[in-house]
Amino acid sequence: MKKLTLSSKDKSSGNNNNCKFILKHPIKNVNGIVIESLSIDNNYYTVMTDVNDLVYINDGTSYKATLDQGIYTIQELVTEIQKQVRSAYSTDNLHEVTFVTLTKKVQFYHPTTPFILEFGTYNKTIAKSIGYDESDTSSLQTHLSDRVYNLNYSKEIIIHSSILASDKYYTTEGTKPILFIQSINTSFGENLTYNNNGENITIKYHTPKVLKNIDICITFDDYETLIPINGYFRMVFSIF
């Protein structure tokens, strides 16, 4: 079987998380592919600009706090949230954001003024990472997260390709051309890898294809948010 290697270093256009490849020599009469290997740099941050870097609080007026992008421990993250919330809230700087060690949850508190955490009204908030539902809270002086924190923004990466995928998958976000789903089981700075050790994950086509212009898109497990990889990916396929 022939081999096809796609590396984002060799992309024809786009970014490392959403790109296109134009093959100099089209591959004809392709009946299917086998995924042989995958390598993606796991270099996305705990807080990512335009992904999960916002906190909105509302005491009758809505205030927007923007977190600095970067890698955080949970203690560092609640310190950053408190800093930016206090900076955004023009009335005073009395909001406290703390990590409750015993329950592994995150608490927001103001000594005098009830407020709403607007995690539903607005998108791209830090809610998911610190254990809050993505919905607005009630107006209270103290808020405790719904679940324990989880700084891993996503459990899986989703690889999309309208050319290489054989069928569209039904998801909560509609139908998507899903090529491959890989669990995230590495830490920041490590390579996320898959190697064919006999699984022979195979995509068969209903009619033979010509591979020339190939698209690859890599998202988090919401099937929509592009992963800011801050690195490269490489995929190898066998073609039959």
Image (cartoon, rainbow, N blue to C red):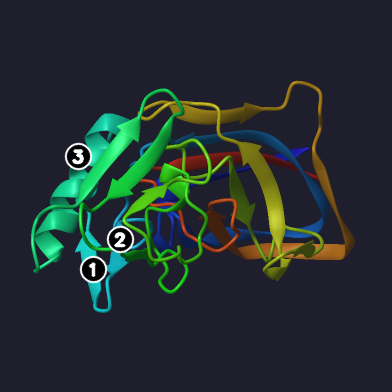
Q: Residue 44, position in %: x, y?
A: 37, 42
Between marks 1 and 2, how big is the CA–CA gap? Answer: 7 Å
Q: Which residue is mark 2?
A: 54
Compared with residue 48, is residue 211 higher up or lower down, i.e. above or below? below
Whichever of labels 3 and 2 marks the residue nearer the N terminus, that label is 2
Tell me which amino acid carries mark 2: Leu
- Quadrant of the snapshot with the N terminus: top right
Q: 113 or 168: nearer the eye?
A: 113
Q: Is residue 231 visible?
A: no
Residue 61 placement, left or right of 213: left
What residue sits 19% from the left and 57% below the top?
Answer: 85
The residue tagged with tag 3: helix, strand or loop? helix
Looking at the picture, tell me which residue is in the foreground, 226 or 196: 226
Q: Residue at x 63, y 58 (%)?
A: 160
In the drawing, what numbered circle is on residue 193?
A: none
> Do the numbered discs 1 and 2 sit on residues whose CB atoms are within 8 Å?
yes
Which residue type carries mark 1?
Lys
Residue 26 occupies quadrant: bottom right
Query: Which residue is identified by label 1?
Result: 64
Residue ID at (9%, 55%): 93
Residue ID for mark 3: 79
Image height check: is 190 above or below 158? Answer: above
Furthest toward the bottom, the residue is: 61
Location of residue 232 in the rendering, given as x and y in whole percent from the top left corner: 40, 43
The x, y position of residue 75, in whole percent, is 27, 31
* Residue 138, visible in the rendered structure: yes
Q: Secondary structure at mark 2?
A: strand
